[in-house]
């Protein structure tokens, strides 16, 4: 691991390690493993405590266990599935981006953001984590979307991003206060593992983070949203909206061609009604594309009266798009339109831009520069598509490969 502005090269990935991660086990699975070996029940508790509460980084450090049991555990499970991590710091140390290489060489990212205490509010340490390596949705303003989809993460690979950050914070006398599933991937297309991860994070005997401090985001996988609502956990649902008009959202969030805005917002309203939790809508502000007064009016009409909050986020620079972030005065006017409609709105500051803290930027950097001709073709296509969207023409393109047949239900 490096913790400086200059990243070290990650070593070559070894062959894929087939042992499951210990943190992906539910409590009863861990207990069953010990019971099958004739071990007393308290052994499972010792391992769970060391996994979730102690600063241990290997089974070998759990000195309360006999050495033979430690070896046996090590032969069966990995203590940590994201141990190979490169860190970059920015914002005077307030933002830390982690690039994690998994055992098969897949790269995923997490971002830890520190918010100092101010005006009566306690300090917050929020970790943004990945649920998939790459992403099949292919939003054109997102570096991860450009990388394409590699694979779903295992439960342990999701929660180990959290354990990793919690250990770093604990070493500095701090505590992780919030987890958001807004890193690489569409969480609702890996929903079983995401739900297991949320359960592990929320479980008082494992990570013990209150559900209200966990946010799960989606680009609008409606059946998955309905499943979350039916299950009823009290975490926050964040919807990557980005546009309130279908023609434009077809381009910005390609899944919109399958689940259009009205269905997504209806599913979000059902979640707010069932859980009492305010839905958070995320809007990446792209200059001249989705930030016009007409877009602001459409969003105000769409969300007026909803139990919802809108976050406006200036677009991070991404090499393969022709687009740039909206100017701040345009974002402020957009926010004012939403505010006049009674919709709570926050303008979010970009964190860690100089270290590529937006989702997928570091992994894209590792993947190397795409050929200039391909970038030029893609830019030209996006200019054409966004111009057609502004004329109100719906996209006829097929759904992104990799999302077909998957709906999180
Ligand atoms: S914005 Fe989210 S859903 Fe869209 S491509 Fe990026 S990671 Fe996937």
Image (cartoon, grey):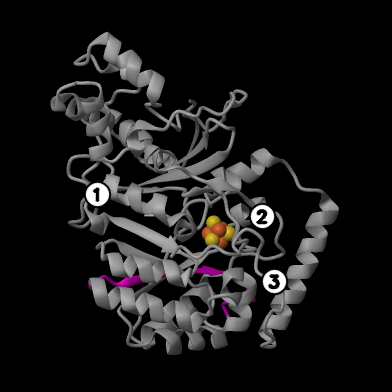
Mark 3, residue position = 398
Quadrant where ligand 1 appears: bottom right
Q: Position of residue 245 (x, y in %)?
A: 56, 84
Residue 346 seen by the camera: no
Q: Quadrant of residue 21?
A: top left
Question: Does residue 68 lie above or below 259 as drawn?
Answer: above
* Distance (Cα) linking label 1 and label 3: 38 Å
- Circle 2 crowding by C-alpha within 10 Å: few under 14, some 14–19, many from 20: many
Q: Position of residue 41 (x, y in %)?
A: 15, 28
Q: Is residue 172 left or right of residue 252?
A: left
User: Measuring 69% from the left and 86% from the top, which residue is drawn there?
Assistant: 393
Question: Does residue 235 lie above or below 204 as drawn?
Answer: below
Q: What range of the chain is rendered magenta?
A: 276-291
Q: Is residue 128 left or right of residue 247?
A: left
* Distance (Cα) linking label 2 and label 3: 17 Å
Disc 2 CB within 8 Å of nearest ligand 1 atom: no
Q: Position of residue 122 (x, y in %)?
A: 21, 51
User: Measuring 65% from the left and 52% from the top, which residue is drawn there?
Assistant: 148
- Residue 36 inside the magenta-drawn segment: no
Q: Give the secondary structure at mark 3.
A: loop
Q: Give the secondary structure at mark 1.
A: helix
Q: Nearer the viewer, mark 1 or mark 2?
A: 1
Mark 1, residue position = 202
301 or 208: which is nearer to us?
208
Disc 1 CB within 8 Å of nearest ligand 1 atom: no
Q: Nearer the viewer, mark 2 or mark 3?
A: 3
- Residue 286 inside the magenta-drawn segment: yes
Question: Does residue 365 lie above or below 192 as drawn?
Answer: above
Q: Earlier in the sequence, mark 2 or mark 3?
A: 2
Mark 1–mark 2 CB contact (< 8 Å): no
Mark 2, residue position = 146
Q: Earlier in the sequence, mark 1 or mark 2?
A: 2
């Amino acid at each position: 691991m490096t913790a400086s502005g200059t990243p070290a090269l990650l070593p070559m990935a070894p062959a894929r390690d087939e042992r499951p991660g210990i943190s992906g086990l539910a409590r009863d699975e861990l207990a069953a493993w010990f019971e099958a070996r004739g071990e007393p029940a308290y052994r499972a508790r010792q391992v769970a405590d060391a996994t979730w509460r102690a600063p241990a980084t290997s089974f070998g450090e759990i000195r309360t266990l006999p050495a033979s049991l430690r070896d046996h555990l090590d032969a069966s499970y990995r203590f940590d599935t994201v141990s190979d991590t490169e860190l970059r710091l920015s914002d005077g140390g307030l933002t830390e981006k982690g690039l994690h290489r998994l055992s098969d060489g897949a790269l995923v990212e997490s971002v830890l953001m520190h918010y100092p205490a101010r005006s009566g509010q306690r300090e917050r340490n929020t970790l943004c984590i990945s649920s998939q390596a790459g992403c099949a949705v292919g939003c054109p303003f997102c570096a991860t979307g450009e990388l394409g989809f590699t694979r779903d993460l295992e439960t342990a690979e999701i929660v180990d991003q959290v354990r990793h950050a919690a250990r770093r914070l604990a070493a500095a006398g701090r505590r992780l206060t919030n987890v958001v599933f807004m890193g690489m991937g569409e969480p609702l297309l890996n929903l079983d593992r995401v739900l297991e991860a949320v359960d592990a994070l929320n479980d008082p005997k494992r990570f013990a983070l209150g559900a209200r401090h966990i946010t799960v985001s989606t680009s609008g996988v409606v059946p998955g949203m309905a499943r979350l609502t039916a299950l009823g956990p009290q975490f926050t649902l964040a919807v990557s909206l980005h546009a309130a008009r279908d023609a434009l959202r077809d381009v910005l969030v390609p899944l919109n061609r399958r689940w259009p805005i009205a269905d997504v917002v209806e599913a979000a309203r059902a979640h707010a009604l069932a859980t009492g939790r305010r839905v958070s809508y995320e809007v990446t502000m792209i200059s001249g594309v989705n930030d016009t007064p007409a877009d602001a009016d459409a969003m105000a009409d769409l969300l007026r009266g909803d139990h919802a909050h809108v976050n406006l986020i200036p677009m991070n620079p991404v090499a393969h798009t022709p687009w740039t972030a909206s100017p701040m005065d345009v974002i402020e006017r957009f926010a004012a339109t939403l505010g006049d409609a009674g919709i709570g709105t926050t303008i979010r500051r970009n964190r860690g831009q100089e270290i590529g803290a937006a989702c997928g930027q570091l992994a894209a950097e590792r993947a190397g520069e795409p050929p200039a001709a391909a970038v030029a073709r893609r830019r030209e296509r996006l200019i054409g598509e966004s111009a057609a969207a502004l004329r109100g023409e719906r996209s006829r393109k097929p759904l992104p490969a990799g999302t077909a047949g998957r709906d999180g239900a």
